[in-house]
Amino acid sequence: MADRPLGTPPPAPQPPPEPPRRRSLLLRIAPAVGTFVILALAAVIIVTGSVQDNRKAAEEARRPAPSPVITAPPAVASDPTGEPDAIEFTTPQGRGELTVIDHTWLRKPGSSEVRLRVQVELRALDGVVEYDPAFFFAARDLANPVRAEDSFAHGDLDVGVLDPGDAARGYLTFLLPRGDVTLMMSSDAADWITAIKIVD
């Protein structure tokens, strides 16, 4: 300590140096950082949920539609007109007629696979009749029905709804060994509506 003359008051204490302003800066940016982190987490959750939803939708789209479960062979409906290739049927929405116009067996050169191609006509008699190639099955063995293929070829049966008096005509294709076949029609609820025999 430096010598000072007697009777001289001691020097006033110096105030402590100011702390750096770092702390106040952190306090100012903390809310902004917190908001950014919350928004980033929310974005990650939304993106993750969207990816999972898209993955689930893609898996469901790849999954084949379930075939009707055969608890008993579908009954071949009686036809009041006496025509062997035309069958009347009834659904909760209406009454219609299914006619097999023609059928042929196809095999590509060099392939052992045989396909049945059937031309059908659907006509609505009362109410409305919904139709879709996915409603049709064919079987040599009724315990193992085969759904119509989605070939999207020209002239294939389309999807639609018929009002009374309306008709729709088109082709259905099935991958089956050659022989006598039962053509079966189901509803979108996977209930059997009718069946008709196609004799080879």
Image (tube, rainbow, N blue to C red):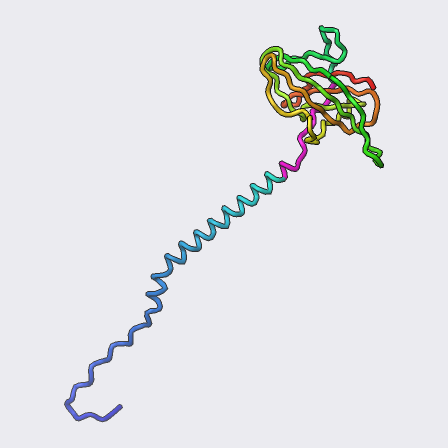
Residue sitting at x 69%, y 17%: 121
- Residue 119 vs residue 9: left or right? right
Q: Quadrant of the C terminus?
A: top right
Q: Which residues are the magenta region?
A: 59-72
Q: How many marks?
A: 0
Toward the left, the furthest residue is 7
Give the vertical position of 78 relative to 198 (above or below).
above
**Horizontal and vertical percent for residue 94?**
60, 13
Toward the front, the furthest residue is 154
Q: Main secondary structure of the magenta part?
A: loop
Q: Looking at the image, which is closer to me, 42 or 105?
A: 105
Residue sitting at x 72%, y 30%: 149
Give the vertical position of 30 relative to 175 (above or below).
below
Which quadrant holds residue 23?
bottom left
- Residue 161 vs residue 197: left or right? left
Give the vertical position of 73 relative to 107 (above or below).
above
**Horizontal and vertical percent for residue 171?**
71, 24
- Residue 139 vs residue 95: left or right? right
Q: Looking at the image, which is closer to me, 188 or 17?
A: 188
Residue 71 painted magenta: yes
**Horizontal and vertical percent for residue 81?**
72, 6
Q: Quadrant of the N terminus?
A: bottom left
**Horizontal and vertical percent for residue 188?**
63, 23
- Residue 6 vs residue 47: left or right? left
Which quadrant holds residue 5?
bottom left
Q: Looking at the image, which is closer to me, 108 or 134?
A: 108
Residue sitting at x 71%, y 12%: 87
Residue 146 painted magenta: no
